[in-house]
């Protein structure tokens, strides 16, 4: 299932996938895979993404 | 053509010394942070799957090689046969990594890797062609270890082609 909340939170901060990837220390393709719902990230990566986008885990990853 | 024990031992020592120097250079590059093979969690997982596919390919090829030698008789020397099996496994490993976007580490640049693959392919294929021209690849109808360069060239060229195709598709997708 696509993670549209992550995509919109990233876009709201005017970040592209590469910028978010660099900020959390992963590849652009990994961010793309998470947004497309092709990859289920570990809690460690979820927290890093939430901190970068200033969101909570619930806001970005809880269904 | 049979070689003396001294010649074979010399070859073995030469190969081992070369491998040792190679490992030393690579270790130094890692220490100096020139080489940095850090992968993210998704890439590590994808590479694990790729290793698995490569491993099973290697086992299958070794069995097929052994079986073909038994049924058809000797068609290549042992080193060339082993190289062919390793080549198949490496191509599978590399291709799966590329398709799953896990071939390059986080610090590696696609253009650098493509250039490196192209240079290695051209050099090995050129040496392979020279060996072929000099009649060293086949001796008495048997594929010899002189085919090693040609095989290495074929591996890197295949990986380069898969990489370029995947790179272009990824670029197209990123632009959409």
Image (cartoon, grey):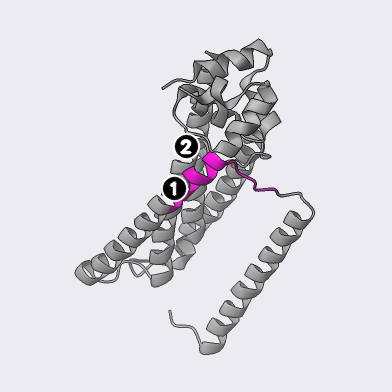
Could you say whether the residue bearing mark 2 is in a helix, strand or loop? loop
Q: Chain of mark 1?
A: B
Residue at the far left: name it: B71
Residue positioned 50% across, 16% down in the render: A4
Considering only vertical position in the picture, is A58 above or below B33? above
For mark 2, name the chain.
B
**Nearer to me, B87 or B99:** B99
Residue A15: percent from the left, percent from the top?
A: 67, 17
Is A9 in front, or is B120?
Answer: A9
Magenta stretch: dominant SS? helix
Residue A19 visible in image: no
In the foreground, B104 or A30: A30
The residue that disc 1 covers is B50
Instruction: Please report the residue visible at 41 percent of the width from the left and 48 percent of the height from the top.
Output: B92
Percent position (x, y) of residue B141? 33, 66
Residue B163 spot, x, y in % from top left: 51, 36
Q: Please give the label number shown on residue B100.
A: 2
Looking at the picture, tell me which residue is in the foreground, B34 or B148.
B34
B99 up-or-down from B176: above or below? below
Q: Residue at x 66, y 70 (%)?
A: B20
Secondary-structure class at tag 1: helix
The image shows residue B156, relative to residue A48, as above or below, that is below
- Is residue B34 left or right of B175 when viewed as pictured? right
The image quadrant of residue B135 is: bottom left
Residue at left 41%, top 65%?
A: B82
Q: Quadrant of the N terminus of chain B?
A: bottom left
First to last magenta residue range: B36-51
Are the residues at dot 1 and dot 2 in contact (C-beta closer than 8 Å)?
Answer: yes
Asked if both marks, 1 and 2, belong to the same chain, the answer given is yes
As for residue B131 lying within the magenta part, the answer is no
């Amino acid at each position: 299932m696509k993670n549209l909340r992550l995509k919109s939170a990233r876009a709201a901060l005017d970040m592209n996938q590469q910028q978010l990837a660099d900020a959390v220390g992963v590849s652009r393709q990994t961010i793309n895979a998470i947004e497309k719902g092709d990859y289920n990230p570990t809690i460690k990566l979820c927290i890093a993404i939430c901190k970068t986008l200033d969101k909570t885990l619930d806001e970005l990853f809880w269904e | 053509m049979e070689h003396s024990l001294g010649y074979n031992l010399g070859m073995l020592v030469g190969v081992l010394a070369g491998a040792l120097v190679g490992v030393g250079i690579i270790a130094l590059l890692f220490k100096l942070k020139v080489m940095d093979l850090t992968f993210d969690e998704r890439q590590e997982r994808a590479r694990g799957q790729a290793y698995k596919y490569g491993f099973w390919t290697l086992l299958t090829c070794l069995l097929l090689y052994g079986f073909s030698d038994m049924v058809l008789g000797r068609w290549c020397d042992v080193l060339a046969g082993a190289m062919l099996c390793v080549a198949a496994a490496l191509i599978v490993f590399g291709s799966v990594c590329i398709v799953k976007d896990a071939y390059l580490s986080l610090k590696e640049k696609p253009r650098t890797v493509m250039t490196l693959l192209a240079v290695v392919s051209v050099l090995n294929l050129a040496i392979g062609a020279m060996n072929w021209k000099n009649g060293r690849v086949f001796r008495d109808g048997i594929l010899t270890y002189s085919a090693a360069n040609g095989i290495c060239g074929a591996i890197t060229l295949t990986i380069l082609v898969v990489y370029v195709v995947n790179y272009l598709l990824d670029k197209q997708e990123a632009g959409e």
